[in-house]
Amino acid sequence: GMGGRAVRIVRRVQDGEATGQDRGQCLHDLIREDIVEGRLEPGARLKTAELAKRYGTSTNPVREALHHLQGEGIVIISPNRGARVRPISEDFVRNIYEIRALIEPYLVRWFVNYATDREIEALETLQRDIDENRNDYQWYWQANEQFHNIIYGRHYNQEAVELEFQQRKVLHILTRRFEISRARWQAITREHWDIIDAIKRRDTGEAARVMEQHVRGACQHLIEQMRAASVNKALHRA
């Protein structure tokens, strides 16, 4: 079945409580949620009529939602094969992280020179909270989002910021399915504190170096998780 939040949104869509635009947004969130939670699997065909039935709506808003999700890189629409959930391969993950290994150090370099005391304090507070609540994964995701948004949000190159944010959303879909290993937790904690430290010392080179290491570590961890999951799947089939 669907999660509680999803069911609430469906009710709002069906009860006609939501306005047209709001309804489109609800539907977009619903389909996205189902993809993120793995109810619609990577590579799965997305048939407009079936989705309309599933969410109790007409086909037009579904088409619109799918186009939005295509813009986010979550859905692929091709003329001959219709819409489907983006198949997520190791190569795709590695490519995204290689782009991130260029963008994130680039974004943090600027921040080192322009970070205010308040922003640095906010990073420290957030990281202390992350350290204390490391078992609450949902919460970690939100705090981690804020951590990186503080560092990237004010950058003058909003195209780069937007690209980083879109990629993060796509990766979230994948990583939400996996646990963070203990070793990775320790690395995240250490790297975040090292980034904060470099920002405080106004050391652009060090901040960029740690950020790149942070990205590459995340890539390695996710690919290991994906491999373990596919081995597991194969064992269950056998």
Image (cartoon, rainbow, N blue to C red):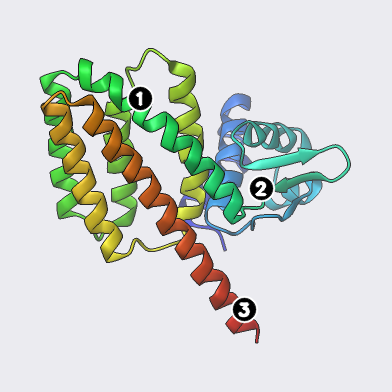
N-terminal-most mark, 2 or 1: 2
List the single residue furthest toward the right. 80
Whether residues under marks 3 and 2 lie with C-beta atoms below 8 angstroms apart, the answer is no
User: Along the horizontal axis of the image, is 200 left or right of 165?
Assistant: left
Task: Give the amino acid at mark 1.
Answer: Leu
Give the residue at mark 3.
234
- The residue mark sitting in front, 2 or 1, is 1
Q: Amino acid at mark 2?
A: Arg
Task: Classify residue 155 as left or right of residue 28.
Answer: left
Q: Quadrant of the N terminus?
A: bottom right
Q: Which quadrant, please, contains the C terminus? A: bottom right
Nearer to the camera, 230 or 21: 230
Q: Residue at x 17, y 35 (%)?
A: 196
The alpha-carbon separation of the residues under discs 2 and 1 comes to 27 Å
Q: Secondary structure at mark 3?
A: helix
Q: Is residue 128 visible?
A: yes
CA separation in Å, label 3 and label 2: 21 Å
Q: Residue at x 52, y 50 (%)?
A: 6
Image-based side of 214 in relation to 52, left or right: left
Query: Are the residues tagged 3 and 1 within 8 Å (C-beta)?
Result: no
Identify the residue at image location x=31%, y=34%: 148
Q: Between tags 3 and 2, which lies in front? A: 3
Residue 32 x/y as whole percent: 57, 44
Q: Residues within 10 Å of mark 3 (few under 14, many from 20)?
A: few
Dot 2 corresponds to which residue? 86
Q: Which residue is mark 1?
A: 107
Quadrant in which residue 100 is drawn? top left
Going from N to C along the chain, the mark reached first, 3 or 1, is 1
Residue 186 rendering spot, x and y as whole percentages: 22, 57
Instruction: Estimate the x, y position of residue 203 in percent, counting from the top left.
Output: 17, 26
